[in-house]
Image (tube, grey):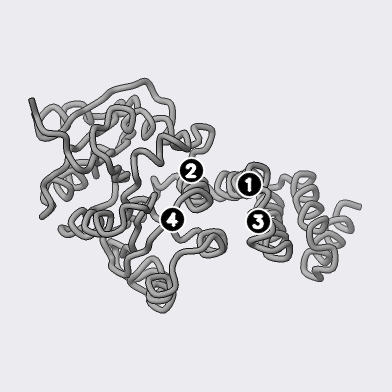
Amino acid sequence: MPQQPAVSVVIATYNRANFLRETIESVLNQRFKDFELIVVDDGSTDETRQILTAYGSKVRPIYQANRGPSAARNFGVRHAQGSWIAIQDSDDLCAPNHLEVLHRNTQAHPECGMVFANGKYLGGPEHNRDEIIPTKKSHALAVQGVRLENIFDKSIVRLQASLISKAAYDALGGHDESLRVCMDLDLALRLCMNYRVRYIDESLFYYRKHEGNIGRNEELRLTENIRVIEKLLHHYPEARKILGEGKVSRRLAYRYYRLAKGRWKRGRYEEARQAIGAALSLRPYAAKYRFYQLRWQYLAR
């Protein structure tokens, strides 16, 4: 009988055949070898099935009708045998020491529900830096530890650079299947509210930016971000006290403001006015939000 692996790597994919081979190879080329690789094909219509079949026993493929990335990840984790879960996107790449570094930290800190690290942009510097989490912030997180406000402020967690306890994942119900963009933020916030989370100041994966990134849908990203924050406050009322009313209001109001500007630009004027009104209900003395509200009211006349 095969020995239970220490780690289960779960890749959910949908019509990413042009990137999938490179992603799979980056996992199979890990220095750490005590893992299984599960790939969930979420109803792809390209040559994904042929690619997976060609890997034979190196990859455990699972197929389902298209239900979205969160459902696909949950489906993969339900089949996982490892005590720790590595969630990977099908267009990003793992560094060769990815699992080695993360697993070593889980063994040193078994009380953690998640350990995570930094990453780099595959195509070169973005936002005037190589790393996803800026160097100064990365050092501070490793030294000071991860707090709720760190995750809340900048959505710093990238699950592609993490290991999550399967026990913790199952206890929290996994990914919220109603979310398509902000599911990682939602899960990270819930993990932080229930378990210790540890950060490692190393870059362990490479993020690929391309036109197919679902996160580039700004409307969806902003509306889901608002939903995730409201969900956090509803299920964990103590989070408001931890974060402070001002921080919560500022972040929610700014998301509504960004939503309003995007909607106005796309000609959805009434929805834009509703969104800027929501921003002002949270921050009634914000001059910028008041300016846009008055300007759009004037233009409507």
Where 53 falls versus 160 (above or below)? above
Comparing labels 3 and 2, the label whose residue is closer to the camera: 2
Callout 4 crowding tier (Cα within 10 Å): few <14, some 14–19, many ≥20: some
Q: Is label 4 in a helix, a strand or a loop? A: strand
Q: Which of marks 2 and 4 is nearer the N terminus?
A: 2
Where 290 falls versus 73 (above or below)? below
Q: Is label 1 in a helix, a strand or a loop? A: loop
At a point 24% along the width and 53% down the height, the residue shown is 93
Q: Where is residue 109 in the image (x, y as percent from the top left)?
A: 31, 58
Amino acid tagged 3: Arg
The part of the image, by quadrant, that contains residue 296 is: bottom right
The part of the image, by quadrant, that contains residue 276 is: bottom right
The residue under label 3 is 255
Q: Where is residue 21 in the image (x, y as percent from the top left)?
A: 17, 42
Q: Which of marks 3 and 2 is nearer the N terminus?
A: 2
In 3D space, how far apart are the residues under numbered discs 1 and 4 (Cα atoms)? 16 Å
Callout 2 crowding tier (Cα within 10 Å): few <14, some 14–19, many ≥20: many
Q: Position of residue 22 (x, y in %)?
A: 18, 47
- Is residue 250 left or right of 63 when viewed as pictured? right
The label number, if any, that marks residue 236 in the structure image: 1
Comparing labels 1 and 3, the label whose residue is closer to the camera: 1
Q: Earlier in the sequence, mark 1 or mark 4?
A: 4
Callout 3 crowding tier (Cα within 10 Å): few <14, some 14–19, many ≥20: many
The label number, if any, that marks residue 183 in the structure image: 2
Decide: marks 3, 2 in contact (CB < 8 A)? no
Amino acid tagged 1: Tyr
Q: Is label 3 in a helix, a strand or a loop? A: helix
At a point 66% along the width and 53% down the height, the residue shown is 238
Amino acid tagged 2: Met
